[in-house]
Image: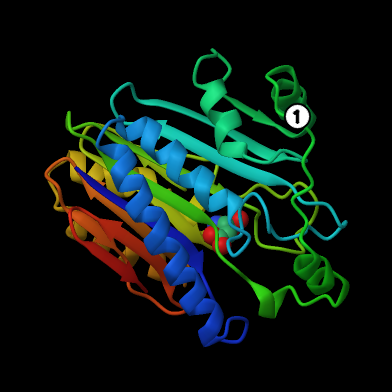
Amino acid sequence: MKIIIHGGFFSESGTNQETKKAKQDALSAIVSQSYTYLQTHTALETVIYAVGLLEDNELFNAGLGSQIQSDGKVRLSASLMDGKSQKFSGVINIENVKNPIQVAEQLLNYEDKVLSGGGALDFARDHGFDFFNPIIPQRQREYEQKLAQSSRIGTVGCVALDADGNLAAATSTGGKGFEIPCRVSDSATVAGNFANEYAGISCTGVGEDIVSTALAAKIVTRVTDGFTLKDASDKSFAELKTFDGFAGVIGISSKGEVYHTDSHPYMVWAAFDGSLQVFN
Ligand code: ASP
């Protein structure tokens, strides 16, 4: 059993050492808690659980504490992929729900598995998701001061390998901050979140770059075709570099390889497979 989570990127201009430490502490607590959960749950159940905890933590740009779009509204995107059944579900730009990853979970049971905007919200309300305002005072202040560039905080994600050898991946984001209303992030697409029986990947970084290179699906495909997880990532990142793309990933393969990118600005991550590793 293995698990890895990420808390997105932080930029040095926007994040001080104190925040970095707080994020690392939060990630270690959440990854440990989620690893315990994985002992008695599937990979799919565990990635939903872990991303739910990350969404509830206002340090991260997902759920509570998400960034605000240029029209003053928060719109959340999240997706889920079960490596075993190969089912993908997600919500794009949903407003006023607490845990978009749990809405994605509900959608796994439907034929129509990815919903956006008002349709996603109607679906959520029909399934008992109450009104929730994810704007925290700090994000509101940043929005008002138009500090989008210097206040970037991280998306969240999780990949898990369970006791039966099944993989799953989940990713959730508040977007990039100050974007054109309803801009679509990579996080609820197969470019940003993908899993099959060979590997699972969750991405963070510039959504447009991640989509342009189909990053998560591409890395997983390469692992499926025989690459190691690291070689699959290295080759895919070399392709991303050709157009100066910016991204980070976490991943696990069915062979038990656990992978995370090291890049700048740093991506905060934590992994647990019996012993804890945290960091950037
Ligand atoms: N990938 C996310 C987006 O472009 C942002 C992030 O990962 O920080 O919306």
**Image height check: is 279 above or below 274?**
below
Q: Looking at the picture, how far across and down is residue 109, in whole percent?
A: 50, 15
Crowdedness of circle 1 by 10 Å Cα count: few (<14), some, many (20+)? many
Element at label 1: helix
Image quarter (top left, top right, bottom left or bottom right) of the N terminus:
top left
Scheme of colours in the image: rainbow
In the rendered image, is residue 117 in sight? Answer: yes
**Ligand 1 is found in which quarter of the picture?**
bottom right
In the rendered image, is residue 200 in sight? Answer: no
Q: Residue at x 25, y 55 (%)?
A: 272
Question: Ligand 1 closer than 8 Å to the CB at disc 1?
Answer: no
Q: Residue at x 43, y 79 (%)?
A: 264
Q: Is residue 179 left or right of residue 42?
A: right
Image quarter (top left, top right, bottom left or bottom right) of the C terminus:
bottom left
**Image height check: is 12 above or below 131?**
below
Q: Residue at x 35, y 72 (%)?
A: 279
Camera-nearest residue between 158 and 248: 158
Q: Looking at the picture, how far across and down is residue 38, in whole percent?
A: 29, 38
Q: Residue at x 14, y 50 (%)?
A: 227
Where does label 1 land, which residue?
121
Q: Is residue 145 left or right of residue 123?
A: right
Q: Looking at the picture, how far across and down is residue 268, in whole percent?
A: 42, 69
Q: Is residue 41 left or right of residue 16?
A: left
The amino acid at mark 1 is Leu
Q: Is residue 153 left or right of residue 81?
A: right
Camera-nearest residue between 139 and 183: 139
